[in-house]
Amino acid sequence: MHLDVTDLRSFYYRSALGRAAQKIVRDQVQAFWPEAKGMTVAGYGFAVPLLRPYLGDARRVIGLMPGPQGVIHWPAGMPNVSVLCEDTLWPIETGHIDRLVLMHGLETSENPSALLDECYRVLGPGGRALFIVPNRSGLWARNDATPFGYGRPYSVSQLEGQLKRHSFVVERSIAALYQPPSSRRFWMKTGAMWERTGRAAAPVMAGGVLMVEVAKRTPARSGGVGVAAAVRKPLGALAAKPSAKPV
């Protein structure tokens, strides 16, 4: 079950804990992909907080938000690039995306297999996708006061196995968000220390999220993925239009 977009916005933009989590995860995304000059970058679920660094150089940035979640205008104070879409039918041409980020999308989807098929369809040759999900062994998945406490948490082997079955090639996997999911002053002030310590002692301490980067296997495994050749009127909803209103 998808969370409501207003709750996600409140967590990531209006709470100290959410802003701290946003920075930690976004910094790791940038460590994977330092720049995206001339590329088409998309995020599905509520991945828009992670896409802001690419607004300046990317050819296009698209925020895909599932219907059950709702959509908000993003980015604030700039022309809207977010669009409401079906879980498994995105208004994007086949092979159009160079970089794709999923956060609060896979673990809350009612049809994760079809969602992964759609991810495979839109990703272009040489493209990369980054899946960010709650870590089954982490503290964040056990705390429903944050968005990572909802949906199906994963272990590394579970997530990598599911991605491989859908013709993705796993490039690298890491854990992040070692800071405890608490807004108390002590935990907030020591957040950077927890990240450093957690990464150095990964076999002992579990991060709150798993981040798995994949490439698209071409051709796909036989019978693994069924993809459509095209989508009617791709990207029509992303043309310059008045700002979208929250759903």
Image (cartoon, rainbow, N blue to C red):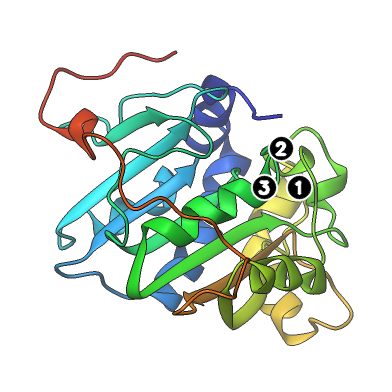
The numbered disc on residue 146 is 2
Q: Which residue is mark 3?
A: 112
Q: Can I make out residue 87 in this image?
A: yes
Q: Is residue 154 left or right of 175 when viewed as pictured?
A: right
Callouts 1 and 2 close, C-beta under 8 Å: yes
Seen at 46% across and 75% down, the residue is 216
Seen at 81% across and 48% down, the residue is 141
Q: Which residue is mark 1?
A: 181
Q: Does dot 2 land on a helix, a strand or a loop?
A: loop
Residue 33 drawn at (x, y percent): 37, 74
| Closer to us: 18 or 8 | 8
Q: Give the amino acid at mark 3.
A: Pro
Q: Which numbered disc, 3 or 1, marks the residue that appears first in the sequence?
A: 3
Residue 243 drawn at (x, y percent): 21, 19
Q: Does dot 3 land on a helix, a strand or a loop?
A: helix
Decide: is 189 above or below 18: below
Q: Is residue 38 left or right of 102 when viewed as pictured?
A: left
Decide: is 221 above or below 111: below
Q: Quadrant of the C terminus?
A: top left
Residue that extends furthest to the front in the rendered view of this protein: 223
Q: Does dot 1 land on a helix, a strand or a loop?
A: loop
**Marks 1, 2: nearer the viewer:** 2
Seen at 40% across and 15% down, the residue is 246
Q: Which numbered disc, 2 or 3, marks the residue that appears first in the sequence?
A: 3
Decide: is 245 above or below 73: above
Q: Which numbered disc, 1 or 2, marks the residue that appears first in the sequence?
A: 2
